[in-house]
Amino acid sequence: MIPSGFLHDLLARVDIVDVVGRHVELKRGGANLMGLCPFHAEKSPSFSVSPSKQFYYCFGCGANGDAIRFLVEHTGMSFVDAVTELAQGVGMQVPQEDVSPEERQRRQRLVERRLSITDVLQRAAAFFRAQLRQSPEPIGYLKSRGLSGEIAARFGLGWAPAGPRALAGVFPAYDDPLLEEAGLVRVAADETPGESGPRRYDWFRSRVMFPIRAVGGEVIGFGGRVLDDGKPKYMNSPETPVFNKGRELYGLHEARQSVRERGFALVVEGYMDVVALAQSGFANAVATLGTACTADHIQKLFRFTDSVVFAFDGDEAGRRAAARALEAVLPHASDLRQARFLFLPPEHDPDSYVRALGAAAFEAAIAEALPLSGQLTALASQGADLAQAEGRARFLAQARPLWSALPEGALRGQLLAELARTARVEPAELARLWRVSGAGPSAAGPARRPVRSPSRPPPAASADLALRLLLRHADWWDRLTAEDHQLLHELGGGHGELVAWFERQLTDHGPQTWAALSEALHDQPIEALAQRIADPASLDIQNEFEDLQRVVNRLHIAVLKDESQALAATASVGPEVLQRIREINSRIDQLRPLA
């Protein structure tokens, strides 16, 4: 932690007028300076900066704070990064906790390496921009997509030439390992080395280049798109010390101001969608980098706005992406935050929709986007015939883990009542079924079971087998239901921790082979458990998804039996308990033929 005394000294030496003035045009207005508020859209200045109090305040939206808070709120940087930037500006050294000289040196080397990588990436970005200006073919392609030179310049678009070593003209020391670490150069793995060592070549070739910027504006990676139907159509930089695609959002640096002005962030799936939407007047769009939306993405977005609209293609892939986005946003969906889901016709993505139907039609579609409650209900309704008792039971079983992920508050209580009405039960009865205290039609904060509490001792053989199959067939995870996911997260004996790690890997990197997962497990606390579970010698069953589903169903049955026995052992077995036991036995009967 940074000592409070240091923060006091730092703010005493920093001039907030200089800090804010780098981002907002300020004019003298009496004792204070005034400008247009960077935190909301306005035409008349209501944003005041006080040199004497070293404080800012907006009379329009109420934003206020000191120089540190301004950097955190306006640029999105972390508290520590904001303090560090201000300290460097006035020649102060941020105190570090009591660490050994060796650890301090290691941290300094890490900082220097990150700075070196971003410098290399900046130089590469400048080269790609220069190449685009000299290349008629990609310029023609961008014009055919309706992009202007102004928009291309705003996003720093470039062109990676076809040559295998075009970057050698920028970096004479082409064999510098830093180029490989920055994700700009590849080293051939199984080829005969050249005269000067392993053969190296550019990572990106014959691609329109989209620089990926951190919130502060520095280039941390690239996305490249081919002009024809070549594969892969899009290619990202590999992960580096400065780039993690599960945490970054393309276009956020460029969209920050528009997000605040329009009051919401628009999350789409592709680079071209972001750039094309900006061209059409939707400068508040950002995109995930080829991964599902993660909790890190959600947390980053909610630092800039309380409202997020997810825009997905209307096909099956878009529906899956929306399901993952819902799961990511649920734990952060407080009563003052809003998430909505827009599904376009299957033949359109946001770019093509705007070009075909116009900006006004897209604006209208955004206004009709499905609220979070509607998306949760739709996801829980999949495969459930609500006209039948069995279908309504399935609906509630699928809704429960989603609803449980919501934070305490009025939204959670309201959703419980809505789910109860959909399932044709009384809210109080649903609260009893889910063992929630204090819930009713307007419950505002019932106690809930933790979604990922690794406290349940698993049937060892079944738990091992389920995780063994998942580690060997990572793509099967998405074929399991949300209820299955919750069950696996709650396994004890270290299995739940392994499941949580496994899901983070899927979120950040997509489905991986066991070899890749094994490498990523190195030095992780659950490495020994995972290596034991995934031992090839123990793979003595057929590799079919149905095998995994049967094992998971056996785990469900074991948990349900434990609950039934616990209820039967209570001192007073009343009608409600008997009803719950009957429901458990019915559910076991449904699962047993499939286990």
Image: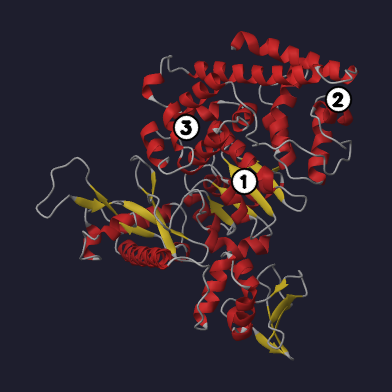
Q: Is residue 363 above or below residue 20?
A: above
**Nearer the viewer's eye, disc 1 or disc 2?**
2
Q: Which element carries disc 1, helix, strand or loop?
A: strand
Residue 504: horizontal and vertical position, in percent?
Answer: 52, 41
The quarter holding residue 208 reads: bottom left
> How crowded is the residue under tag 3: few (<14 C-alpha within 10 Å), some, or many (20+)?
some
Q: Earlier in the sequence, mark 3 or mark 1?
A: 1
Residue 501: horizontal and vertical position, in percent?
Answer: 52, 39
Q: Is residue 337 above or below residue 49?
A: above
Q: Which element carries disc 3, helix, strand or loop?
A: helix
Q: Is residue 569 left or right of residue 377?
A: right
For the residue marked with disc 1, what is the amino acid?
Phe
**Nearer the viewer's eye, disc 3 or disc 1?**
3
Q: Is residue 469 above or below residue 119?
A: above
Q: Earlier in the sequence, mark 1 or mark 2?
A: 1
Q: Which residue is mark 3?
A: 529
The quarter holding residue 318 reads: top right
**Front residue of 409 and 33:** 409
> How crowded is the residue under tag 1: few (<14 C-alpha within 10 Å), some, or many (20+)?
many
Q: Which residue is mark 2?
A: 425
The quarter holding residue 42 reads: bottom right
Q: Earlier in the sequence, mark 2 or mark 3?
A: 2
> How crowded is the residue under tag 2: few (<14 C-alpha within 10 Å), some, or many (20+)?
few
Q: Which residue is mark 1?
A: 310
Residue 493: horizontal and vertical position, in percent?
Answer: 57, 31
Alpha carbon distance from label 2 to label 3: 43 Å
Q: Would residue 472 be seen by someone viewing this image from the given angle?
A: yes
